[in-house]
Amino acid sequence: MFLICADEIVPDSKTLSWNHSVPAALLLMAPFDLLASLAMDIYLPVVPAMPGILNTSPTLIQLTLSLYMAVLGLGQMVFGPVSDRIGRRRVLLGGSLLFAAASFLLAGTSDAAMFVGLRLLQAMGASAALVATFATVRDVYAERPESAVIYSLFSAMLAFVPALGPIAGALLARHFGWRAIFLTLGILATAALLNALPRWHETRPSGGPHRGVAFRPILRSAAFWTYTLGFSAAMGAFFVFFSTAPRVLIGQAGFSELGFSLAFATAALAMILTTRFAKRFVTSWGLAGSLTRGMLLLLLGAALLTAGQLLAAPSFWTFVVPMWVIAAGIVFAASVTANGALQAFGTVAGTAVALYFCIQSLIVGVLGTLMVVLLDGDTAWPLVGYASLMALVTLTALRQLRRRQRA
């Protein structure tokens, strides 16, 4: 799976200046995708301590997670259409600059309200960079076999972020203090920006629309909604897991910050191992089959969590091990949802990507937060509730889509 073609891409009429080999393109694009996730995961080990550090409530600190997710999606409703109008490069560079600046400012603040505001700016920067990255992938690789390689490797690399991010955050906080976490994010974003400045060329199709926003045909697509719901189910399950994991494992099970990070990393390692073999199964199962199996694994993991919650005290075995099953389901779903949702929208790829991530982020941010607040975030019930509900909704939508396709 990790063997990729090193031949140079022959530019076509849409991508006249994008002549990077696939490995070079991955090295150029992946940091922006990874940083959007890293800004969540590297921060997790200090979340339980932040109310005391900033002299505020745990609810406000939860908002720094939930609002980040929501703004990550909502911002793309602005930046996606903007990238269709002015190009991917400008949006990418501007977003990464905003992300870097907000990260450095977060490292210097001690005010809770300012901290929340800067997290929103950081999310806006991540949103712009993310939509420009995925729109570029859609521009260059939509009709080429390399697209499956790109999406699979993005998924594989993203799996390393929740595996290594919390460990890195715990070590940085232990040795240098919590501010070092945000300094690190700022430095990494600056490095990615400097790498992109001379090499990230414009890929927006020259024949794409320059006026208006093509929301209606995208939102009327049953396939778009079905696979976007599947993406929301997968990403939301992980969001609820990392929102509750510090409270369950540190607060209830008595794990240290480093012990929590190592336990948390095993769920990400389960994703990495699944990704290693996912391509073979996805090719055999197809888009719908892979999404179906992903949702069934979410339901199985939720059942195991329920048994652990009812029959035993919070522990690695009752909370983390069932997440391994959910993690495998996340990989099978996320490997196909982008292609399933976006494949029909070539000339408005920026807008389609924006809607895809926006809807996902809103569902995850709103429904995921409600589950954490209403179902007791110190237990496994929020994860059980979210994974079960969204998996059932996605399977229902997929059944309806199949009926339409047969008709």
Image (cartoon, rainbow, N blue to C red):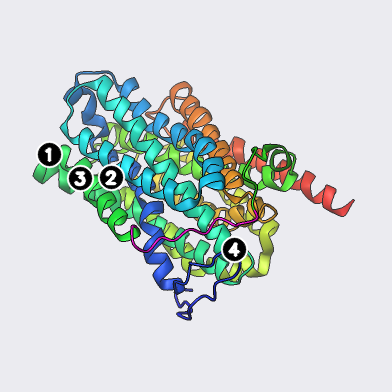
Mark 1–mark 2 distance (CA, rounded to whole Å): 13 Å
Q: Amino acid at mark 3?
A: Ala
Find numbered disc 3 in the image and state the secondary structure of the residue it sits on. helix
Local packing at callout 2 (Cα closer than 10 Å; few below 14, some 14-19, many 20+) is many
Closest to the observer: 169 or 392?
169
Neighbor class of circle 4 (other Cα within 10 Å; few <14, some 14-19, many 20+) is some
> Looking at the picture, which amino acid does disc 1 mark?
Gly
Disc 3/disc 1 C-alpha distance (Å): 9 Å
Residue 100: image location, x then y, percent:
27, 43
**Residue bounds of the magenta highlight:** 197-207
| Proximity of marks 3 and 4: CB atoms separated by less than 8 Å | no
Residue 14 numbered mark, or none:
4
Is 251 left, or right, of 75 in this rendering?
left
Element under label 2? loop
- Please give the name of the residue rendered at 45% of the width and 48% of the height, measured from the top-left corner: 130
85 w.r.t. 89: above or below:
above
Residue 84, above or below 66: below
- Indicate which disc, 3 or 4, sits on the residue closer to the N terminus: 4
Task: Determine whether the residue tagged by mark 4 lies in a helix, strand or loop.
Answer: loop
Instruction: Say which amino acid is labelled 2.
Output: Ile
Q: Nearer the viewer, mark 2 or mark 4?
A: 4
